[in-house]
């Protein structure tokens, strides 16, 4: 199946008018596969970090959501060891009017506001609930350790 | 190169219309006036060095946020009427960062510089020297007041050099005539000119700076003189009061400087600076004429845009005759929007571009039009060709205006900086505060000097007119696109929630059982049917976007056909076998 016009448009806009703190570049051999970087939002324990993600547009996109995963290790209650993200719009709350750009902005926002009540990484969530300061300290440590600018 | 020369060259060499150059800031003349101000100050011994020292001391300590603010954020706190001065006195000194910018610097300290008046057209400029008030008449009164500001002054001054009388004396005082103020409290002063010859602290200052070298010792000397002066004050007669200020010596100082005693602040010596006032009046005049020019240009430009819009919309109807030119205009506008010539709309950088960048982009845009043969030659109707020329002229005018504005804003900034540097008077902030206080904060703020004072600039306003009035004349496909496939929403289905999508995307959603509207999540997708077709819009699309609508329709059918085959268990490959 040929590449839908919409994907071409999105790719072009991501290149020409990128959202602040976010880059998404398609692979040369597979234009549905994107290398993504998201800057940790200021004011969060992830500030200063440069997080790598992968994003894949399935055949059904935009009827089905893109698949997004963190490649950089991150200490966050809604992101597990494998980098899987617990974010409603990537699952049941997906809308075909959402785009790669909006998805990545949501991921960035998730870094600003972790939701330990809906955890994916239960141990991290527990830590966040019981000792917020200490947990944030670890998040910061991990950011410095794993998400340093390359 | 000196900016004055550079500025003249810009004005001379650019192709600005004569009425623009006539309204431009007269940099050279203003520069001459600065020299007069310096002479004036020198005539009373206030060289920039001495003055700087005096003002520095009195202006301390301005913690970061407390400096006489030049940021427009403080505008709303400025009281409109001078009557609020009394209340402001205390508030203004609360050091909480919300203080009135104009009053912040007016601590009762060594020296302060004031540009004051009811508005930016009518004002005077003066220097207030606060001499130590330790004479018997005033000391008691001083001590009754809360000591608010003591950090700023040398420790010796801590008891006397304290408060703002405007805020702490009884409310009526500022407005009542001097006669009602008892002599022992606030003795107004009348001195003969001969007294000034011998005792004028400023003469002393002049001598002092020469003889003793340091401002510190000079000031000590002045304080002594001032005390002596105060003793004599009590025998003096009252004089009529002008604006709360008592004119001490009606005869002018030989150099044109007025020396005045402030009735409300015994111990103050106020020096009127006519040349300085003249400088700022001339500067004000220049701003006003630029403002006027901006108004004229705005009206003219808006009129031009309206006419242009009318011409294009008349000549480019989706009829057989107009269709051709319509397509060309659509492409021109689309390229123009994309080129973002004057302002950038990207997320990383939003806002006005600088002149150089805009020029490069305008040239690139013109080149692109020529390359795509969109430069009017291919247009069929004469009106459209003319309109095209007009459109390009408006673009060039916007660019020129940007240049003109930049030159003027630079000139304004530089001449004020020069003023401040040469005289040591903090004119920029004082004047800005005056203008802010007197300009009602609406759209009449000076548009051509804008970056110096406000954020809205004339090119920005004009560009908005162009974008808002001209572009909608030709419908653009982006305004009729489906949010899902991003192509033209054909055939258009209006869901019960009011959102519009193309039929194809909604069919796909229905097949997947997705009921929520992609834009508002209302559960309306599954119940959409033939009744949801927006027939009026469908006809509009067929009329204005015939090609696009046809192509989308074909693509829809092809895709739907493929899906049906797939549903039957077939696909392209199977068919070939």
Image: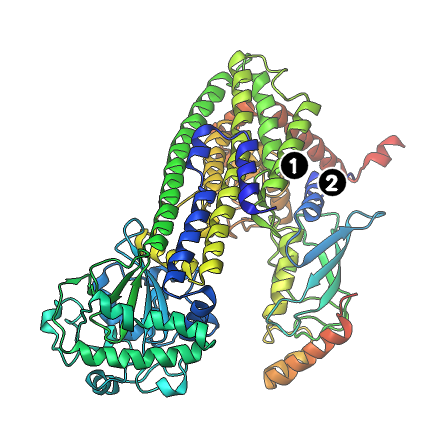
Chain to which the residue tagged by mark 1 belongs: B
Which element carries disc 1, helix, strand or loop? helix
Give the x, y percent position of residue A82: 77, 70
Quarter of the image containing the C terminus of chain B?
top right
Give the x, y percent position of residue B68: 41, 66
Residue drawn where x is 74% and y is 57% of the image: A36
Using the image, determine if residue B239 lies above or below residue B349.
below
Give the x, y percent position of residue B512: 64, 48
Left/right of residue B403 with respect to residue B448 in the rendered view: right
Q: Nearer the viewer, residue B277 or A33?
A: B277
Using the image, determine if residue B443 lies above or below residue B339.
below
Residue drawn where x is 17% and y is 76% of the image: B187
Q: Quadrant of residue A88?
A: bottom right
Q: Give the numbered dot on residue B360.
A: 1
Q: CA distance from mark 1 to mark 2?
A: 54 Å
Q: Quadrant of residue B142?
A: bottom left
Left/right of residue B238 with respect to residue B85 in the rendered view: left
Residue drawn where x is 70% and y is 43% of the image: A12
| Tag 1 near tag 2, CB within 8 Å | no
From this viewpoint, which residue is outermost toward the right? Answer: B577
Chain to which the residue tagged by mark 2 belongs: B
In the rendered image, is residue B162 in sight? no
Which element carries disc 2, helix, strand or loop? helix
Left/right of residue B466 with respect to residue B277 in the rendered view: right
Q: Nearer the viewer, residue B33 or B399?
A: B33
In the rendered image, is residue B268 in sight? yes
Q: Nearer the viewer, residue B409 or B552?
A: B409
Q: Nearer the viewer, residue B492 or B396?
A: B396
Q: Which residue is mark 2?
A: B567
């Amino acid at each position: 199946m040929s590449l839908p016009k919409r994907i071409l448009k999105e790719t072009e806009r991501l290149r020409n008018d990128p959202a602040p703190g976010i880059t998404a570049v398609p692979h040369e051999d597979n234009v549905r596969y994107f290398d993504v970087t998201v800057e940790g939002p200021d004011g969060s324990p992830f500030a200063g970090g440069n997080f790598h993600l992968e994003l894949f547009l399935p055949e059904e996109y935009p009827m089905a959501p893109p698949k997004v995963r963190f490649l950089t290790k991150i200490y966050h209650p809604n992101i597990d060891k494998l980098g899987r993200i617990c974010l409603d719009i990537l699952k049941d709350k997906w809308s075909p009017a959402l785009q790669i750009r909006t998805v990545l902005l949501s991921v960035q926002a998730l870094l600003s506001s972790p939701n330990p009540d809906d955890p994916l990484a239960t141990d991290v969530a527990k830590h966040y609930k019981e000792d917020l300061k200490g947990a944030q300290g670890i998040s910061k440590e991990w950011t410095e350790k794993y998400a340093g600018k390359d | 190169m000196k900016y004055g020369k550079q500025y003249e060259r810009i004005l001379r060499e650019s192709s600005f219309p004569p009425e623009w150059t006539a309204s431009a800031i007269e940099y050279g003349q203003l520069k001459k006036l600065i020299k007069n101000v310096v002479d004036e100050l020198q005539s009373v011994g206030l060289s920039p060095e001495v003055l700087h020292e005096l003002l520095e001391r009195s202006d301390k300590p301005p913690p970061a946020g407390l400096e006489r603010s030049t940021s427009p954020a403080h505008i709303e706190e400025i009281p409109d009427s001078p009557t609020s001065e009394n209340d402001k006195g205390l508030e203004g000194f609360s050091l909480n960062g919300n203080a009135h910018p104009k009053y912040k610097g007016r601590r009762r300290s060594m020296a302060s510089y004031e540009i004051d008046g009811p508005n930016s057209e009518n004002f005077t400029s003066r220097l207030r020297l606060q001499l130590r008030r330790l004479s018997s008449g005033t000391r008691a009164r001083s001590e009754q007041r809360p000591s608010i500001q003591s950090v700023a002054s040398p420790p010796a001054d801590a008891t006397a050099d304290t408060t703002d009388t405007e805020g702490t004396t009884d409310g009526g005082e500022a407005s009542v005539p001097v006669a009602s103020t008892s002599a022992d409290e606030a003795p107004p002063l009348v001195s003969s000119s001969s007294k000034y010859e011998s005792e004028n602290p400023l003469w002393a200052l002049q001598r002092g700076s020469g003889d003793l070298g340091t401002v510190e010792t000079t000031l000590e000397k002045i304080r002594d003189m001032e005390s002596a002066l105060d003793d004599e004050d009590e025998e003096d007669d009252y004089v009529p009061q002008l604006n709360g200020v008592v004119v001490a010596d009606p005869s002018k100082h030989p150099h044109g400087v007025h020396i005045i005693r402030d009735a409300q602040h015994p111990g103050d010596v106020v020096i009127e600076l006519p040349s300085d006032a003249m400088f700022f009046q001339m500067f004000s005049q220049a701003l006003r004429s630029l403002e006027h020019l901006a108004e004229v240009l705005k009206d003219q430009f808006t009129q031009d845009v309206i006419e242009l819009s009318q011409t294009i919309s008349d000549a480019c109807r989706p009829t057989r005759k107009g269709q051709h030119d319509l397509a060309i205009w659509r492409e021109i506008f689309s390229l123009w929007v994309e080129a973002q010539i004057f302002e950038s709309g990207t997320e990383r950088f939003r806002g006005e571009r600088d002149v150089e960048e805009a020029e490069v982009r305008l040239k690139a845009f013109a080149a692109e039009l020529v390359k795509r043969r969109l430069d009017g030659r291919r247009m069929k109707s004469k009106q459209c060709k003319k309109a095209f020329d007009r459109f390009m002229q408006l673009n060039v005018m916007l660019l020129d205006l940007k240049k003109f504005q930049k030159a003027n804003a630079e000139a304004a900034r530089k001449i004020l900086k020069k003023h401040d540097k040469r005289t040591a008077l903090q004119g920029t902030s004082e004047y800005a505060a005056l203008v802010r206080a007197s300009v009602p904060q609406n759209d009449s703020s000076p548009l051509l000097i804008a970056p110096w004072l406000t954020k809205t600039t004339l090119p920005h306003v004009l560009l908005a007119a162009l974008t808002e009035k001209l572009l909608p004349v030709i419908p653009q496909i982006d305004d009729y696109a489906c949010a899902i496939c991003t192509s033209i929403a054909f055939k258009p289905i209006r869901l019960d929630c009011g959102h519009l999508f193309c039929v194809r995307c909604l069919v796909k959603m229905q097949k997947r059982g997705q009921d929520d509207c992609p834009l508002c999540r209302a559960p309306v997708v599954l119940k959409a049917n033939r009744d949801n077709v927006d027939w009026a819009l469908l006809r509009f699309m067929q009329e204005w976007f015939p090609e696009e609508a046809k192509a989308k329709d074909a693509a829809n059918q092809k895709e739907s056909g493929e899906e049906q085959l797939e549903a039957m268990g077939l696909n392209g490959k199977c068919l070939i076998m």
